[in-house]
Image: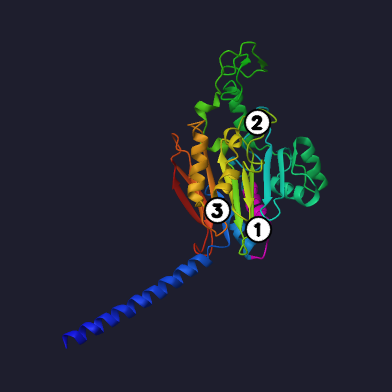
Amino acid sequence: MGSGGNSSELWLSALLLFLLQAVGGSALLHAGASDLPLVINTWAFRKATEAAWSTLQAGGSELDAVEKGCGQCEIEQCDGSVGYGGSPDEHGETTLDAMIMDGNTMEVGAVADLRRIKNAIGVARKVIQHTGHTLLVGESATMFAESMGFPSEDLTTQKSLSIYLKWLNRSCQPNFWKNVTPDASKSCGPYKQTEDFRREGKNILEKTVHVHNHDTIGMIVIGQNGSIAAGTSTNGAVHKIQGRVGDSPIAGAGAYADSTAGAAAATGDGDVMMRFLPSYQAVEYMRTGMEPTVACQKVISRIRKYTPFFFGAVICANTSGSYGAACNKVPGFTQFHFMASNPTLRQPSEQIVDCI
């Protein structure tokens, strides 16, 4: 009787274990299968994520989704750091940078220092579709945009004008000049180079940079079939010297996509980050099998060796739909918020990582 009872209990235990394994295995398979499609983007720009996800669900391509997602931020002027009416340069003008990359063909379209055109990511897409080039800049990029049917509009708003006037009233502080006369820390210029370069001047903005001075929307989209696209859009650094171009429109710096390995996008101090091609480097790390979070952390650590107090973050995703992010910990910036959407999450969800 006792042994029979034990046998029954063992049989029931074995059956229960088998059922749990079967259910667990199904859950794991389902989770793996539902990681795609995927949309992730820098910062808590939820409506941008929703726009990209809706585009995919409506049958749009990965490039369509990136264009719509980044374009939504241009319309909404996300954090004042994307689109018109933000980040006036030292002459009070808002200019835009954007890029979009096809991870299947490795084609890139980009614009930089784009003037009087609101839809920068749309113009970048036209560079792929209608030219044999990769990057168009300045007034010539504007002429191209107009030839493609984009309307010419004033990008200045009351808000951006107010930011500019307050800056002028502070004797143009802070700014990006160094090794010039008159002293850039006390006056507006115009500046000329100093004859004595024995002591390297310090970038005034390094002491006072605010997180929102260097925001960008960077977006990665991976379709159900594994095709990958990435893109960026920004109005750059506030009070920048005219003609300055940051990392956002540079392939491998602002973003990078390769459907055989993954994609990454960066945000932060573009003048520092573009020197290290963090997006390209992260994708190459993932190509070796490295997990996305670790790949992001490694590129952040690499930059930090040279510039310990830089402001920046990177998002990464591999071909299976796994994703992660990393950021450099500095005063006032200890966590990085980004958005993700896939079938498992059910809706665009804000993600948070602690900076390293």
Instruction: Estimate the spatial distance between the alpha carbons at disc 2 and disc 3, rounded to whole Å.
Output: 33 Å
x and y percent of residue 351 in the render? 47, 52
Would you say 124 lies left or right of 76 here? right
- Identify residue for label 1: 62
- Identify residue for label 3: 317
**Mark 1 or mark 3, which has the lower sequence index?**
1
Kind of residue sitting beneath label 3: Ala
Would you say 113 lies left or right of 36 here? right
- Identify residue for label 2: 89
Answer yes or no: do the residues labelled 1 and 3 have beta carbons within 8 Å? no
Q: Residues within 10 Å of mark 1 (few under 14, many from 20)?
A: many
User: Is residue 73 on the magenta stretch?
Assistant: yes
Element carrying mark 2: loop
Q: How crowded is mark 3: few (under 14 residues within 10 Å), some or many (20 or more)?
A: many
Kind of residue sitting beneath label 2: Asp
Q: How crowded is mark 2: few (under 14 residues within 10 Å), some or many (20 or more)?
A: many
Q: Give the range drawn in magenta.
A: 58-75
The image quadrant that residue 251 belongs to is top right
In percent of the image, x 65 and y 31: which residue is there?
89
Would you say 245 lies left or right of 128 here? left
Foreground disc of the pair 1, 3 = 3
x and y percent of residue 341 in the render? 54, 58
